[in-house]
Amino acid sequence: MIVQKTKRKIFALTRTLKFIYSKYPAVTVLRDILFVISTAAEIYGITILGKFIDETTNILLSWNSFQLKEYLSTDSFFYLLLILLLWIVAQICKRIREYLHHCINENIKKDSQEDILQKISDTNLEDIETEDFQDMLVFVPSFSVERIVSTYENFSTVLSNTIRLFSAGIILFGTMRWSVFLFLIFVLPETVATHYRRKQIRIYQDEQTGKIKFLNYIQNLGIRIANFAELRVNNIYSHLKRKYSEEYEQYVKGLLKKHFNFTKDQTAYSVIGETLKYGYIIYVLAVSIAKGLTFGTFKALFDYVGVVYASIYEIINAISLMSNNLEYVEEFFDLIEYQGFGDSKHGSIKLGEETPTLEFKNLNFEYPDDPGTKILSNLNLEVKPGEKIAFFGGDGSGRTSVVKILAGLYRVNEGEYLIDGHDIQDLDRGQLKKKLSVIFQDFVNYHFSLEENIVIAGQRKNVDRKLFEKVSKIAQVTKFKKQMNFKNSNILGKTFPSGKELSPGYWQRLSIARMLYRNRNIFIMDEPFTFIDDISAREILSNIFEFAGETRSVIYITRSINYLKDFDRIYYFDKGKIVESGSWDELMKEKGKLYKETKRRS
């Protein structure tokens, strides 16, 4: 068990160092070199200080008056200059190392967050919704990222203090011989105790991940401007404050208890260790007297005792910190290297440029976190290139689940999802996404500029002005821009001081324009007109059909009967099943469920 844990941590350390040294080789190697230079200056400075003391003592005992000209030619002055030079070298190295630390720290934060975003973007909804993945998304930004930097710092501490220990230890060993190894006994109690207490803190934080997630949720709920009106007017802030206070008090009470035990043990054992060190200094004094050493030599030995003691402590303590930090860091690499079904279950087939046919054959679906509850049952449907298809049904009918499957966000376990006759799992990764433009029912309001709200869906950095103007006109963004005297550069939303808020209908128009600007072969629209008036919605839908043309497909998901007669074929969903399908005229003639629903609503 211990061997396996050690191997795992060594592997995690290797990955951490590889992550840092491969990304920032010049900065990290330079920083390590500066460690060596500053350590050499420090150790050599101790010896020179001893010699300076001896030479200065001779001057104090033999000179009756001070002559500056004569002093400038003495060894005392030479050693004094050398001490100053070594101090300057050490200080320059120290300051540069601090600057490089900030460079590494900030870049790690940036790059690690980019890696997290990249992993999320590469992952499917099915994987992101799992409890393990959600826990990692809470834990990693809060604890793991800063520990990557700490692990590197700990490794650098071990490296530099090993050099300090080796240099000072050899010099001290020349006089004190094997007694030097007593320092291990002096240092071990404190380092073992603090290591144990750190482990207890980490275990506690692991156990409290759920509570941290809940606290983050309450905080984000309270600070979102979009929520302010309801929270403020209905006095929900009082409940949130009370809930946050109760939950956080429970969490912090346990955490502070762990930190108190850590501080208590660290203080007690550090006093014991320091006492033993000063007892050893008395022994050094006795040896110095017995050997007739000079005061300057004794002073150097005194300082070397401090260096050896501090170095051993720093090495063991840094190893302890590394061991503890690596438990956190492993979560980062587990997240970055997470293998979802999209990573492991895909083929190499690439689709052509034309619009593909989408087809479900005997498809059944259950959400992974709720197996046994069938959401979709025995679905058979087909969307041919250029067709305009509507999925109609009420709440809980399975329409939105179909959208998520069509977009490849969930895997198909029973039945088939075919794209141009190929099983979706046989396609090369990303092939389906290249064919789709989607507006989801819960679309996102991006608090960026008006222009960026639309072009954010584009794949090229440069804005396609002709396409931008075209989709803006189709979605009636141009119309409301003129009405509100908006420019493309206007920041939207209330997150930033200069932001301008929009009505839900205008936000939805932007989301439609964003879908169109993506300019793919298949447009999927889940309740795209919820906040848009009927006359405008009909105009926009007509324009979308014209934009799609005869070769590109449109899939419309709705609970509204409006506009259904404009589609080539309608699939009526009820309780996860397709209960009837056909054109509007065909379904009205059959006088089935859609016919009855139309009569009921009218």
Image (tube, rainbow, N blue to C red):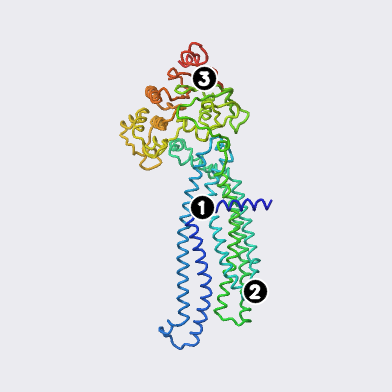
Residue behind mark 2:
177
Residue 396 relative to residue 444: left or right: right
Q: Secondary structure at mark 3?
A: strand
The first of marks 2 and 3 along the sequence is 2
Nearer-the-camera pick, 370 or 208: 370
Q: CA distance from mark 2 to mark 3?
A: 90 Å
Q: CA distance from mark 1 to mark 3?
A: 55 Å
Q: Secondary structure at mark 2?
A: helix
- Amino acid carrying label 1: it is Ser
Asked if one can make out residue 575 in the rendered structure from this viewpoint, the answer is no
Q: Residue at x 65, y 69 (%)?
A: 182
Mark 2 and mark 3 residues within 8 Å of each other at the beta carbon:
no
Q: Secondary structure at mark 1?
A: helix
User: Measured along the vertical axis of the image, is residue 173 above or below residue 600?
Assistant: below
User: Measured along the vertical axis of the image, is residue 100 above or below residue 522?
Assistant: below
Q: Which percent across, then down, holds residue 36?
A: 52, 65
Residue 350 relative to residue 260: left or right: left
Closer to viewer: mark 1 or mark 3: 1
Q: Quadrant of residue 537?
A: top left
Q: Residues within 10 Å of mark 2 (few under 14, many from 20)?
A: few
The first of marks 1 and 3 along the sequence is 1
Q: Residues within 10 Å of mark 3 (few under 14, many from 20)?
A: many
Residue behind mark 3:
572
- Amino acid carrying label 2: it is Arg
- Amino acid carrying label 3: it is Tyr
Residue behind mark 1:
22
